[in-house]
Amino acid sequence: MSLKNAKILIVDDDTDVLLAVKMLLRPQVKEVFTESNPERIPALLAKENFDIILLDMNYKSSLNTGNEGIFWLRKIREKDKNVAVVMITAYGDIDLAVRSVKEGATDFVLKPWRNEKLLVTLEDILDSKTSSPSPKTKASAPKNQLSILGESDAMQDVLYKIERIAPTDANVLILGENGTGKSEIAKLIHQKSHRDSQAFVHADLGALTESLFESELFGHKKGAFTDAREDRAGRFESANGGTLFLDEIGNISLSQQAKLLTVLQNREVVRLGTNMPIPLDIRLISATNSKIYELAAHNSFRKDLIYRLNTIEITLPPLRARGEDVILLAEYFSKSYSEKYNKLAHFLDEKAKDKIRKYNFPGNIRELQHSIERAVIMTDGDTIAARDLEFSPSIESNNIAEEIPKSLNIEAIEKSTILKAIEKYDGNITKAAKELGLTRTALYRRLGKYDI
C-alpha cells in the first residue's frame, strides 16, 4: 500500500505537534485526521478505518496511570487489531516506548524527529502491511528490503552468512564503505533472530560527543550533571532483551572504547550518578566504514574491543563489485519512487543501463538511490534515458583523468586527498568530510594525525 492511499490519525494534546504533522502529511497521504483528546479515540475508530495511528505517550489528562500512551494503545488494540500504531515519545520515555512495542505498537518515533525519517517510517509500515498480513510474517525478512536485493556472488556469500548467524546470539561486526547498506543488514539479522519481537535500538556513535557518550549509551540519574532533569535509560538498557546496533563504531575515542569494553565484558551497565549495576541481555551488532584493523595496528583502536565485537564478521561489497546488482537495484528504486510520487511506472532504457554500469558509484547504494529518485521526479513519460541520469560531476568516472600520485605511501596519499577536499570546499569541514565519505569526527581525528 502506498502512502498516497493511506488514512492516518494523529493523537497528541500539543496543538503545535498536530499542526506540524498535518502540514507534513497532507500532501503525502489520502486523508489526515487530528485529535487532541485521546478519550475520543473509541468514537473515531467506530467512524473510520485508519491505516496508521500516531499516538503520543503522555497527555495532560485526569487519567493517572503515568503512562497514558500504553493505556490508549491497549484500547486501540481492543477495537482494531489491524491498525498500525506508532508511538510518539521524548527520549526520556524511550523505555516506555520499547515496552509499548511489546504491547503491540508497530514502532515508535522520538521527538524531535526529522520529517524525511518520519515519512520513511510510515512508508515502511505500509509496505510491511501489504506484504505481511501477520506480525510474525513481518518479523521475517521482507522481500522488498533493500539489503537483500542482490544476485551477485558477493551478496550471496553475505546472505549465506546471515542465514547461519542470525539465529545465534553471536556478536556481529559489519564492515563496508558508506552507503553499502550496513544498517539494513543489521535490521535483517535482528528480524531473522529469536529476538525479532523485541526492541531493535540504533545508536549512531559518530553523532555522539565525548560529553554525551556515557549518558546516551548508559543512561543517567536525575541530578547526575547540570542538564539531567530526570532519570533516563540509555540505549543499552532500552535494548535489553533485543538487539543493540552500534553504528560508526570506528569513530569513537580510546577513552570511549575503554568504557564500552567494560560494559561488554561485565554484561552490565551503570547509569551516571549511581553505583547500581543493571544486568544486560542484548545481541550486539556493530558497524563501521573505517579500516578498523589499520586503526588497531596504529594503536587508535583497542584490539581487545575488536575481539569483543567480531565474533562473526561480515564485509559488505561496494556496489561497483556487485555486477548486475546495480541494475536490479536501479529498477527497484525506479518502481518504488514512481509509486511514491504517483507517477507512471518508469523503465530504464538500454543506454541508461549502460551509463549506470560504467559509473563506479563511490557513494554506493545511497548514491544510486538518490540519482534514480531525481530522475523519476524530473522525467516526463515512462522511460528514464541516459540524459536523465545525473551523477556527481566531480567524481563521474568517464570525466576523471587518472592521476598517478607522486608517492605511493598510503599515509601520504590520504593526507594529500584530505588537503584537496578541504581546499575544494574552502575549509568547510562538513562538506569536505562528506566528499571523503567520513564523519566530521573521523576527519578531525585525521587532521590531528597529519598535523593539518
Image: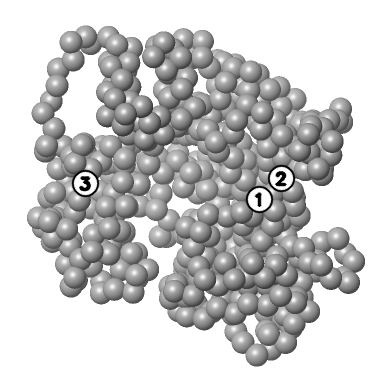
Q: Nearer the viewer, mark 3 or mark 1?
A: 3
User: Total number of numbered labels?
Assistant: 3
Callout 2: SS: helix
Q: Position of residue 150 (x, y in %)?
A: 32, 49
Is the residue marked by circle 3 packed among few (<14), some (14-19), or many (20+) residues within 10 Å?
some
Residue 199, disc? 1
**172 lies above or below 187:** above
**Disc 3 target residue:** 391
* Depth order, front residue of 392/237: 392
Amino acid at circle 1: Ala
| Label 3 element class | loop
Dots 1 and 2: beta carbons under 8 Å? yes
Please tell me whether residue 159 is drawn above or below residue 170 in the rendered image.
below
Q: Which of the two labelled residues, at mark 3 and mark 2, occupies the earlier sequence position?
A: 2
Left or right: 140 as drawn, with respect to 417: right
Q: Which colour scheme is used?
A: one colour
| Mark nearer the N terminus (3 vs 1) | 1
Q: Position of residue 153 (x, y in %)?
A: 29, 41
Q: Which is more N-terminal, label 2 or label 1?
A: 1
**What is the crowding at mark 2: few (fewer than 14 residues within 10 Å), some, or many (at least 20)?**
many
Name the residue beneath numbered marker 2: 238
In space, the residues marked 3 and 1 are separated at their CA atoms by 38 Å
Dot in front, 1 or 2: 2
